[in-house]
Image: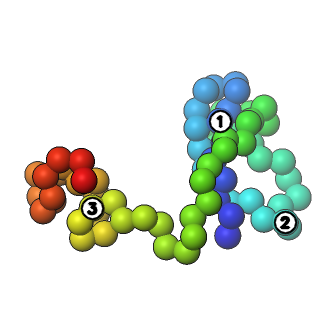
Amino acid sequence: MPLHEYACRTCDRAFETLVTAKTAEPVKCPVCGGADVERLAGLPTAGKPAATNCRGDGPPCGAPFCGRRGGG
């Protein structure tokens, strides 16, 4: 399912929503209900998203309980 990121021009909030070919209604902001939204450019993922820590199952590296030190 394509998950797209949008920014609402009315309330300046960013949000994600599923958009399919069968989606008949225009995308609206879930916070204010505004329809003045802009689709943000994002990078496509190839299958499984990139791991966020050394185990691939949690918060970014640098967390106190992560086995890695620093940013990489």
Q: CA distance from mark 3 to mark 2?
A: 34 Å
Residue depicted at x 84% and y 48%: 26
Instruction: Give the mark, 3 or 2, whose residue is nearer the N terminus.
Output: 2
Compared with 31, 54 (above or below) is: below
Q: Amino acid at mark 3?
A: Asn
> In the rendered image, which residue does mark 2 sit on?
21
Label 3 close to label 2 by CB (< 8 Å): no
Can you give x and y, in whole percent of width and height, for residue 65 in the image?
Answer: 11, 58
Instruction: Give the mark, 2 or 1, whose residue is nearer the N terminus.
Output: 1
Label 3 element class? loop
Q: Quadrant of residue 37?
A: top right
Q: Quadrant of residue 35?
A: top right
Q: Amino acid at mark 1?
A: Ala
Label 1 element class? strand
Q: Residues within 10 Å of mark 2 (few under 14, many from 20)?
A: few
Residue depicted at x 27% and y 61%: 53
> In the rendered image, which residue does mark 3 sit on?
53
**Count of labels shown?**
3
Residue placed most toward the observer, 7 or 69 = 69
Q: Disc 3 vs disc 2: which is toward the camera? A: 3
Label 2 element class? loop
Residue depicted at x 72% and y 42%: 39
Q: Amino acid at mark 2?
A: Ala
> In the rendered image, which residue does mark 1 sit on?
7
